[in-house]
Image (cartoon, rainbow, N blue to C red):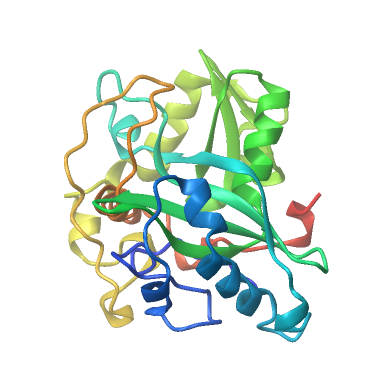
Amino acid sequence: MNARATGAGLLTTAALVLLGALPADAAEALPPAPTPEQAASAPGTLDTLSRFFARDGAVARSAAAPRVEGGSVPVRILSPDFVAGKAGAPVARVEFRASRAVSSDGQKASLWTVKQAGGWQVVNIATGDDEIRYTEQGGRVLPGGLVFREPQIDAWYVQKGAKVLPLDEDAIRAVGRNGTSLTAYRERVVRAYGDKLPGSAYAKKGVAGGYGPQAGVPAPAPAPRPAAAAHAEPAVTVASATAGVGAALALVLMSAAAVRRRRGAKEG
C-alpha cells in the first residue's frame, strides 16, 4: 500500500499500524522508550521495519538492514484553534515526532512516536520521509521558521512572523509561489474549514474528514489544549495525538482523498 495514513484509527494506545503490511497489534513487541530516538532505533522497531520494507517483495526481510538516520523532528498540523481565530493560537501545533528510517535498497519510511505514561512509543510507520524532509527544507527556506502541514490538501508550509511560504506544489497552488501573509493564510483556511470545526453541524453529521458513518471511524472529541507560543513544543502524548487527529478530522483535514498520498511529483 503506497499511502500515508493519518486517520484516528492509527494513533491509538499501543497500536502500530503498518499501512496494510502488518496487523494493528504489532506494537505489543515495541515497548516505550525514554526518548523518541531510542524508541525508533530499538531492536523490535528495526525488526518491524524489516518486515515493512519487505512487504511488497522489494527487498528480502533478511537483507533489509533498516537504520534510523538522525534525530526525530516535531510534526505540526494546522491548528483548529488558529482556524477558529482563537487569540494567541499558533498556526499549527505539534501532534507527534517523526524519525527517518532507511532500508538497504534505499526505501525510506517515517516512524511516528508519541509520549505516554511509560515513555515514547512508535505508533505508526508511513511510507516516505515527508515529515523530516520538509522540516529540513523549511529550515533552509526560512531559517527559524515553523514547518507545518495542511493535511486536507497535503500541503507543507513554513511560517515565521507574518510570512507563510510554500514548500511543495500543493502549497504553491494554495498560496502562490511567493507565499502569503499569515493574515491572508488564516482568511483562506477560515473560508475552507471555518464551518467544519469541532462541534459544527458538519462534524456532528459524522462525515468530518471524509469519514462517514459507514466507514466506522468516528472522529474522537478533541481534548482541551491551551494555546502555545509559536515555537513551543508541548509533550506529545497518545491522548493528545488522537485528540489532535480528531480535531483535524472535524476540520475535514483528513479527507479520504488526502490520506497521506504519495505522488512522484512530491519526491523531488
Residue lying at 17% horizontally and 60% vertically, measured from the top left? 204
Residue drawn at point x = 67 percent, y = 59 percent: 128
Q: Is residue 4 visible?
A: no
Q: Is residue 153 left or right of residue 202?
A: right
Q: Nearer the viewer, residue 255 or 4?
A: 4
x and y percentages locating residue 47 in the rendered image: 58, 73
155 to 260, vertically: above or below: above
Q: Position of residue 168 (x, y in %)?
A: 69, 42
In which quadrant of the rendered view does residue 30 lie?
A: bottom left
24 lies above or below 197:
below
Q: Quadrant of residue 11?
A: bottom left
49 relative to 201, above or below: below
Of residue 222 and residue 48, the one placed in the foreground of this image is: 48
**Residue drawn 68% across the image and 43% down it:** 133
Q: Is residue 104 left or right of residue 51?
A: right
The one nearer the camera, 99 or 63, is 63
**For the view shown, which residue lies furthest in the top direction?**
161
- How many numbered tags mark residues here? 0
- Indicate the position of residue 188 as horizontal and vertical percent values: 46, 33
Image check: 51 left or right of 24? Answer: right
Left or right for 6, reference 260: left
Q: Is residue 191 above or below residue 151?
A: above
- Residue 107, image quadrant: bottom right
- The quarter of the image holding the N terminus is bottom right
Q: Residue at x 64, y 25 (%)?
A: 179
Instruction: Locate residue 266, reporting x and y percent.
Output: 73, 53
Question: Can residue 227 be spotted in the picture?
Answer: yes
